[in-house]
Image (tube, helix red, strand yellow):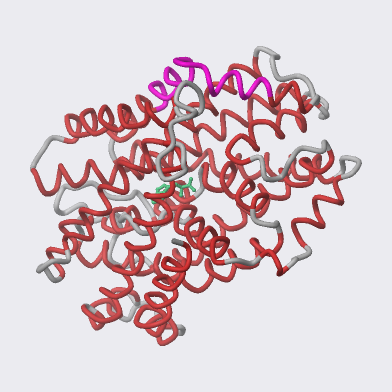
Amino acid sequence: MATAADGRGNWGSRAGFVLAASGSAVGLGNIWKFPYMAGENGGAAFLIVYLAIVFTIGISVMLCEFVIGRASERSPVGAFAKLRGGAWPIVGFLGVAAGFIILSFYSVVAGWAVAYVFKSALGLLQTSDPAALGRLFGDFSSHPWEPILYHAAFMAMTVAVVIAGIEHGIERACKILLPLLFLILVALAVRSLTLPGAMEGLKFYLYPDFSKVSAQMVNGALSQAFFSLSLGMGAMITYGSYLARHENLTRATLMVTLFDTAVAFIAGLVILPAVFAFSFDPSAGPGLVFITLPAVFAKMPAGVVFAVLFFVLLTIAALTSAVSLLEVVVSYFVDQRGMRRKRSAVVAGGLTFLLGIPSSLSLGLWKDHTIAGKDFLSLMDYVGSNLLLPLGGIAVTLFVGWVILPRALEEATSRGAHPFSLARGWVFICRWVAPVAIGWILIGGL
Ligand code: TRP
């Protein structure tokens, strides 16, 4: 099915592509970040703003990225150069930079998940005492070198998968993992929702209090949408570039968006009811998932088994996302600089590891060093997710809406093979709604 004419590698099948793109999208963003963002920003009001953004701007940007990728069959820098040239390739460079920045702290948090595989297997997490679990996470994440070891281990795994290449590395990992992750999340949601006191959390999550809506919150929801859907830095351009000509892009876009959103929503159903049932603080921030979930496991029959399985799956979900972040950087060196895949994966992975070290230390030794009021990890997240990704989104929609529209429409319908009934709405969003709304939200959030 694949047309690997140019030897860049290709997906083995359409299901493989949808799975791999979903593998990129579904990760720590859904399970770690979404619940704590919702917790910090008033629950249901955040959820509604988030959904509104995902199904207007997010889904449109994703289609843009797939279109640019497949139309050019290049990774981001080369894609813009091939389709138009001029200053446009700068957008691709920004994407490569965003990839570095995001992956650096992403790998640190993923390292926490790896560590929790071992901690749960050793039975260290078997308590539902909030204070004890909080202390455990605090001691671990502030340790000077233990989390850095796990960060290194996670980065090494990411490099290994990227070296293995497109079809055999990325695609195979996603096929088995994603359905399994989904099932276990549903099981956890059932347990969490049936805890005494869980209904408070459900109310928080589903009954909106619109006084919680603010410019910062809308900015947070926008950043989260880009982060969760893997948009704004060319990851989906890169993935689209490996896809065969005749596949239905609009359907793939819809499927990936729905799946990613469903996983985030269910993660909220797991975490937030548990937060209330155990009287944790919903605005506890980045540690939330690592503190609440063990409490839920401790209240389950065979909780240890569930805990180990869950953290293994979370690690693999993070891995399939991290791979897409590194892949953007690596494919730049491979496609544009003629570097060998292996060498560029090792170099890029090594540099990203180094950039992640200050993020890891920012929870411990460097806790008191802040830049612009943020610790280093939050700063990296802010620069990557709140600034670079939305900027990339503006660039991508303007490019499709104003610069290559006829070509883009041809690509979105696979040269007429798959009619796209919402094409006019998509074009309108690309030309006007997305650039204006993203720009406005960006400015409001500063
Ligand atoms: N979407 C992933 C997550 O939710 C993270 C991720 C992978 C990403 N690739 C990306 C974020 C590209 C932004 C851009 O965990």
Majority secondary structure of magenta residues: helix
Q: Is residue 444 left or right of residue 298?
A: left
Give me the residue at 66% from left, 20% from top: 136
Q: Which residues are magenta?
A: 135-154
* Of residues 206 and 22, the one drawn nearer to the viewer in this rendering: 206
Residue found at the very far right of the displayed protein: 196
Q: Is residue 396 above or below residue 224?
A: below
Residue found at the very far bottom of the displayed protein: 424
Q: Position of residue 153 (x, y in %)?
A: 40, 21
Quadrant that contains the C terminus? bottom left
Q: Is residue 321 left or right of residue 272?
A: left
Q: Is residue 313 left or right of residue 39?
A: left
Q: Is residue 412 above or below residue 337?
A: below
Q: Position of residue 319 (x, y in %)?
A: 44, 35
387 magenta-colored: no
Give me the residue at 71% from left, 61% from top: 44
Q: Position of residue 162 (x, y in %)?
A: 30, 35
Q: Position of residue 52 (x, y in %)?
A: 58, 71
Q: Quadrant of residue 343?
A: top left
Quadrant that contains the N terminus? bottom left
* Of residues 334 and 294, the one drawn nearer to the viewer in this rendering: 294
The total number of labels drawn is: 0
Q: Is residue 107 above or below residue 308?
A: below
Q: Quadrant of residue 66?
A: bottom left
Give me the residue at 44% from left, 64% from top: 252
